Amino acid sequence: MKLVVVSATAALVVGVGAFELGGGSGGNGGGTTSGADAGRSVPPAPAVSDPQPVVIPDKSRLLAPAGGTKYFGIAAPEAPWRSSVLAGIGRDAGGPVPNMVQYFVNWNRNFDPGAVRSAYAQHALPVITWEPWEGGAKGTKQPAYALGTIIDGSHDAYITAFARAVATNRWPVALRFGHEMNGHWYPWAERGGVNSPGEFTAAWKHVHGIFRRAGANNVIWVWAPNILRGADPVDLASLYPGDAYVDWIGLSAYDVTEQTAARLLDPTLAEIRRFTRRPLLITETGAQPGAQKAPWIATFFPWLNEHPDVIGFVWFQYTRAQGGGADWTFTSSRASREAFRQGVRTLRLVKTPGADGV
């Protein structure tokens, strides 16, 4: 699905008391491209005396959830910048607060350390969907961001600056670079009209190498195709750079007409398991409104618990009015919200460390 909006900068107070952050939002959905950057002013941070030292975790603590625990992730307007968003979603979910938050960054935006610290202040692992383009308003081809321009080094200065900023910030981040590459709706798709076979993996390895040389060892690399339904007829294995370059498999999977989670997810999962056993995170999911939505949600959580190799999900909590193309939210009806509440309570969640060091 196509991107809607990207992130904006924010400030963060880490230390004593609550915080409230201004910022932007991002997402995709519904096969449309719309929206604009969102932002709001942030008041000056109050002085904090004698803040407690913060212990930044190693990414190994987050890579392999222990004991069947899962990530409950959210992509939503103004998350992670505004702390009330995740808290409110937790209330809507009947108690559990998301421990992962995803947001979108185009390649005309720099790395925002405030967003990462904001996520950790809420005990949520940040997932950055990093998109080599200037947004959907400029179309799906954008030759200036063709895969060949990444491979030949045209964007090395930007990539290097981003990588160094990630390394300097030190907090672990999951980086979902060039997602849904098996579609045709992004400039980095090999079948998008400006690229050639083999270029996606070459571009991935090029970017990965820049991060390695920059010392950005705090990155969890997420390779994330779209489910087979709706994508182009391309062999997923041909787009995979290899386990040496990938930590997690991601997956965009939206219910449209499928009656169960298994019908939506099993065909693509089986295809992926032909060439990698890396842990899988459903990096975007939701369900269209309709009679099937609540029943589909009711099947999703049992499916998740039955698959120990699937470490969690990110729910796309956007409405049509917010640029989602459809109302994918689990709060679109009382029945959907209740099905989600009952299901999410069956999960044992990963304990994500926070900016308070816990």
Image (spheres, rainbow, N blue to C red):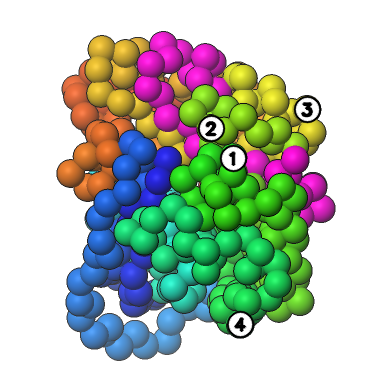
Residue labelled with disc 3: 274
Determine if residue 246 is in view. no
Say whether disc 3 or disc 2 marks the residue closer to the N-terminus. 2
Distance CA(mark 3)–CA(mark 4)? 36 Å
Q: Residue under circle 1?
A: 182
In the image, which residues are magenta?
A: 238-265
Q: Earlier in the sequence, mark 2 or mark 4?
A: 4
Percent x, y of residue 178 = 57, 54
Quarter in which the N terminus is drawn? top left
Residue 241's x, y, as percent? 76, 50
Q: Which mark is residue 157?
A: 4
Cα distance in 3D space between marks 1 and 3: 16 Å
Marked residue nearer the N-terminal end (3 or 4)? 4
Secondary structure of residue under mark 1 = loop
Residue drawn 25% across and 61% down? 36
* Mark 3 residue element: loop
In the rendered view, would you say 170 is above or below 62?
below
Q: CA distance from mark 4 to mark 1?
A: 27 Å
Compare residues 265 and 192 and report the one nearer the observer.
192
Residue placed furthest toward the front: 193
Q: Which residue is mark 2?
A: 231
Tell me the crowding category of disc 3: few under 14, some 14 to 19, or many 20 or more residues within 10 angstroms, Cα based.
few
The tag earlier along the polypeptide, 1 or 3, is 1
Three-letter amino acid code at the position of disc 2: Ala
